[in-house]
Amino acid sequence: MQFEFSDEQAQFRDVVQRFCRDKSPAQTVRRIMETESGFDRDLWRALCGQLGVAGLHVAESSGGAGFGAVELGIVMEEFGRSLMPAPYLASVLATSALAELGESDARDALMADIAAADTIATLALDPQHGDPICRSVSADGGRLNGSVSAVLDARHADVVLIITADDARPTLHAANAGSDGLTSRPLRTMDRTRRLAELRFDGVVADRLGSLTNRQLKHVYDTALVALANESAGAAQALFDSTVEYVGMRVQFGRKIGSFQAIKHRLADLLVDVELARVAAYQAAAALAADEAVSATASLAKFTTSDACMNAAREAIQLRGGIGFTWENDTHLWYRRAKSSEVFLGTPAFHRERMIQEMTA
Amino acid sequence: MSDATRDSLAASAAEVRDWLAANWDPELSLVEWRDRLADSGWGQPTWPAAFYGRGLGAREAAVVEQEFARIGAVGAATAGPRGLAAATLLEHGSDAQKKRYLRGILTGRDAWCQLFSEPGSGSDLAGATTRADRVQSQGEGQAGRAASQRWIVNGQKVWNTSAHHADYGILVARTDWEVPKHQGLSYFLIKMDQPGVEVRQLKQMNGHASFNEVFFTDAVVDHDDLVGELGQGWQIALTTLSYERSGFNRIRGGDRFEGRHGRVYREYERELEIANEPYTWYPQRAGRIDLLLERAAESGAIRDPAVRQDIATAIALQRCANWFSARGLARGPAGSIGKLAASRVARAGNQAHTVISGIEAMFEGDDSPLDGIVGEVLLSTPATSIAGGTDEIQKNIIAERILELPKEPRFDGGPFKDVPRN
């Protein structure tokens, strides 16, 4: 299958890119990451108000903006490029899960609040591979008990969504952040623009929103993978571009270091990584948008992009020499993101395995 | 697609359908049929109307191809290096050269080979030392008339696919030793069947002999067969190489005529067989990713998680490489990205086939799995990152032409006669 971005999609990318350039330059990323919460509610309101990112990819019939996975990919790619410090991926997880449910007042109200930026929501995932079912939390008589680690943006979420497995079918619950018995412990994250927390549920009263089939759970997971893959493609591109710029300026031994074959060849190899990762991310988004069987491609995109991004981060530091290893140089911000994305939602090895299982199933 | 485009495509389809209905006959000889293609322009619809084509765009041409496929009509000859010669002539040839050669290329009457690489200039193609010297023909014409001039060629070329049955070659030779190396080359069309041209087969590490060495000893080229201007050889060679990189000389046709009968098909099969003979190992050279899952299931290696990792790596690389080229991204200098990707695919395929086969990776020929296919993969993939320009050259192209990084200092800028060489 082959696809091209439509003119509308290209224009949308321009708008997102301009927003990121204006609102999320590296100094803003640094300012926000130094704060305790790592989060700026005004920036998030602007993102939702001006770009309409929350619920962007969710069908209108499910309370979303009615765009698709391709637009989701565009936003994620540009956010990866600029390291946009906003709880967007958490919002993608939450709205993707809500979108799988049938219409209900509770779901529709929550979706509307999320889209309006009045509510920030996240979805707790099993920490190991990001499985949407949290087996360490159980629902008993309408109360949640247990704990789950590494919940994305849980500290600034107003609502935590969680899928438990103990009913006949996996069930999606919504717990308000302030609920009795719900405590959170912030975790120190390597990527300080991607905050995680451990959540404890001690008899938390939650809304039981509905149950999900395995196919629906898979769709939520694949959507998350496609989103993260596109983000990594953007981050890899940013690392690559800044490194090409650097070696084209830096002079040693009387020549720009970019004139040495030792440097050129590494960058040429890296360009292959970055380009192949990008087509994988686009292809996965297009397949998801077209409602094709996407799991193998989503896993492929996840490991291809995270490997490329990690490689770009290593090369970006290496080719800068000493300065690349300093705090003041911005490269480590993307390195941290690359490392974080390498393992979030499952390691590259996990997704290679998943791809083969999907292909041979 | 706009309505107007759709209408014009439908019109092309209707026109070619009518023409095929009136002209296609599987009992014609291949030459008779292809003569009709050349006369009508339907064999190479994107070529100009003045030269055996119809001047159509790629979309219309695809429609024409569909119509041919629909009734099982054989198309123009495309296999082997002839496509490179045609593409280059269309861009740089004189009208007289196009008239003289394109018809024979299209009909398949003439086979072509490419005479660029030399033992002393592989990656550094512009360092060619095969020489062409201008002489006045004896006893004919008047002094100073171009038509009376000839070129005498001496030297050696190598890696010449299909040279052993080629009628003509596209040749790059040095015509001026006093100028810098890129400026002293000229591009010629040379007749292979002459006393001064000797072709020897060259055996590769995988046992096939797909290439040749070609030796020139006072071989003769008419001045009319100089392409473009004297000294333009390098620029014109770049055109040829860009088509080569974009896979212009790939094998086409073959299986879509299965179950069809008639003289034209028999002759076409024979033509394909000869033309494709040097390429039978090319799929193996690319890594045979298509066989991995099946082979792993059959050998039981699929149960090994480490093997599954290697298979996944290879499959993912190949899919990405295919998507990359399918999106039309691999044109121009970006073709080098596609070529590097192909090298990675081939290496990953080799690795995965090795771990799938285990001890059987020690075997070759009939004892190797899949009637020797696996052994051939293992012995053929190293060629992928060399043939058609090494990975290192592709990386230079990417760095200098895509990333616009500064060039390396060079030591071959002066008159070519003073440049150190092998």
Image (cartoon, coloured by chain):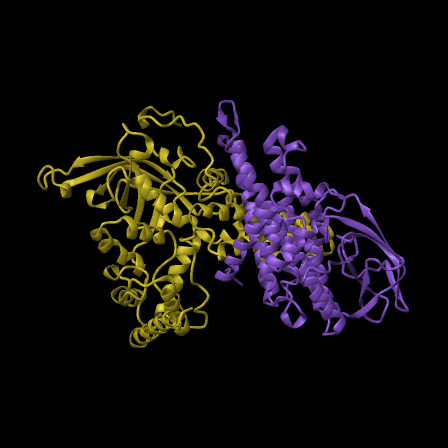
Chain colours: A purple, B yellow
Q: Going 83% across and 51% down the picture, which residue do you hit? A: A198
B181 on left or right of A27: left
Looking at the image, the residue that sits furthest to the left is: B142
| Whether residue B374 is visible | yes
* Residue at x-position 53% and y-position 38%: A244
Q: Is residue B264 above or below residue A136?
A: below
Q: Residue furthest front?
A: A42
Residue B3 located left or right of residue A263: left
Residue A140: image location, x then y, percent: 90, 67
- Judge from the rendering whether residue A109 lies leftward or rightward of residue A8; answer left or right: right
Between B398 and B345, the residue placed more toward the observer is: B398
Residue B183, above or below B380:
above
Residue at position x 73%, y 58% from top? A120
Count the numbered circles shown: 0
Question: Residue A232: x, y in percent?
Answer: 63, 49
Q: Quadrant of residue B77?
A: bottom left
The one of A198 and A359 positioned closer to us in this rendering: A198
Observer-nearest of B353 and B205: B353
Please give the name of the residue rendered at 45% of the width and 33% of the height, measured from the top-left corner: B406
Of the 4 image quadrants, the one containing the N terminus of chain B is bottom left
Pick the quarter of the image with the C terminus of chain B: top left
Q: Position of residue A355 (x, y in %)?
A: 67, 58
**Closest to the observer, A287 or B367:** A287
Q: Is residue A328 left or right of residue B50?
A: right
Q: Is residue B281 visible?
A: no
List x then y, in percent, for residue A103: 72, 74
Above or below B385: residue A86: below
